[in-house]
Each structure stands twice: as structure tokens, then as C-alpha cells.
Image: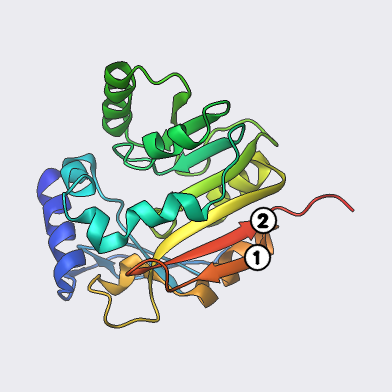
Amino acid sequence: MHKFATACVMLLILAGAAPLILDRPARAAEDGYRNTPLTLEGIGKSYMGRDIPYIMGHEGADWLERRERGEEEGTARLIPMLKLKPTDVVADIGAGTGYFTFRLAGEVPEGKVYAVDVQPEMLDRIRARIQTNKTRNVEPVHGSIASPRLPSNTVDLMLLVDAYHEFALPREMATAMVWSLKPGGRLALVEYRGEDQNVPIKSLHKMTVEQARRELEPLGLKFVSVNSTALPRQHLMIFEKPRPE
């Protein structure tokens, strides 16, 4: 997305301003998708009744590494809640600058972390950090809007922090993620709480537990648990790929 548009989207996300609506032809619903009014913040498409926002462009990468993030989101609390094993294979989907990627890498010294992102500029930053830190168990992966491009049945845990709601093709992407999870593998979905009006984030960048379950359960994931109190502003929702009976 253009740098000016990215900056405007970031201001709208944080300030909660009303989006600028642009004209776009309507389209009938197909597989849960429907055309909606195109706005400065939204891509002009909804999925199962949820409007999809633009992805945050790489121009906003510094916001992901802001000093206040740890306090605002309680990021230090999240990794222990995932209960990783040293040998786990983990995928950081929508890895961005690698904020969580390298924290995950330290928890799985005998495993590996796939750092998946659709933006080459973000992956370049991760590669630079790999070289600087001499990290051996992080593998950058250039995903697409429809797939993380990971091998089938190989991932123990997928972590998505404020990423899933921005997927332009959530049905296709989730289907591909299920394909890559091992039987019994978990998907950890971290999203700003859509039920909480006090969370100071624009509504398009929040998700309710009900909406997450509506979208993910039909695609083969079992809802396991939700923790809505451990993190200051976000849900931690755990889904699992069932084991064969």
C-alpha cells in the first residue's frame, strides 16, 4: 500500500476516526465473501459479516517495535502462555519485523520458527536480524495472501498476533494453515477484543471470540480455549487440528 495510505490507516486504527467511503461495485456473496463500500481503511470486502481492513504496510514497521508495545499488549506474558516444547516447530504468521519470531526462537532451541510474511521488506528485516543475532533456527518464508506456503503436517504451533483479521482471503489462508498443522497442532490467535469498547483500536482491527469461531471452526479447527484477561487488550484464542480417530 502507498506510504500515505498506510499512514492514514494507522491514524484511523489508533484514533478510531470514521473511514472515507469510496465507490465500488457491489458483488453477491460467494463462500462467505461479499463486496462492501471501499474505504480508506477497508479493502471493500467482508467475510462472514466482518469487514476486512487493509494490511499494515512495511512503512509502519517501526510501530511494531515501539517502546510502549510491551506494556500496552503485555507481550512478555504471551510466550509462556503458549507452553512450547524445545523441539517444537512454530510458525509466526504475519511475522512483520520478527518481534515475536525471535522470542519464539529462544523457546524452541531444538526446533525451528518459520517467519511468514507477504511483504518482502518485512522479510528483509528479519534476515538482517538473523545475521546480526546469528540465529540458526529461524527460516523466513514469503507467504501469499492465500497460503503461508509451509509443508503439510509439519507445524506444532502457529502464532498469529493481530494478523488474521487483515487477511484478504481468510478462508483460503485458514484452510492452508490447517493443512500445514500437525494433527494435534495448535493455532494461537491473538486479536484485540472486539467485545470491549474500551480497547482503543478501530473496530475493523478487533475480533470477537464468536466471530473467530464462526470463521475457523468450519474449516477443521477445534476451539480449545480463550484467555481474555491475561493480556491488557487482546484475546488469546487456542484452536487445534483434531487427531485422526
For badge 1, the amino acid type reads Val
Residue 46, given in percent of the width and then of the height, sits at 43, 67
In this picture the colour scheme is rainbow
Front-most of residues 90 and 52 = 90
Q: Which residue is mark 2?
A: 240
**Label 1, label 2: how far apart the Cα atoms are:** 7 Å
Q: Seen in the image, is 162 located left or right of residue 34? A: left
What residue is shown at x 13% (from left), y 62% (from top)?
11
Percent across and percent down for residue 172 are: 56, 50
The correct choice, above or below, for 129 with respect to 119 in the image is above
Q: The disc labelled 2 sits on which kind of residue?
A: Glu
Where in the figure is residue 195, as x and y percent of width and height? 40, 81
Circles 1 and 2: CB atoms closer than 8 Å: yes
* Residue 37, x across and y down, in percent: 30, 70
Image quarter of residue 96: top left
* Residue 112 visible within the image: yes
**Mark 1, residue position:** 224
Quadrant of image for the N terminus: top left
* SS under mark 2: strand
Which residue: 45% across, 39% down?
104
In this view of the protein, which residue sits in the foreground, 21 or 184? 184
Q: Residue at x 27, y 21 (%)?
A: 128
Which of the two discs, 1 and 2, labels the residue nearer the N terminus?
A: 1
Image position of 243 (left or right of 179): right
Residue occupying the far right of the picture = 245
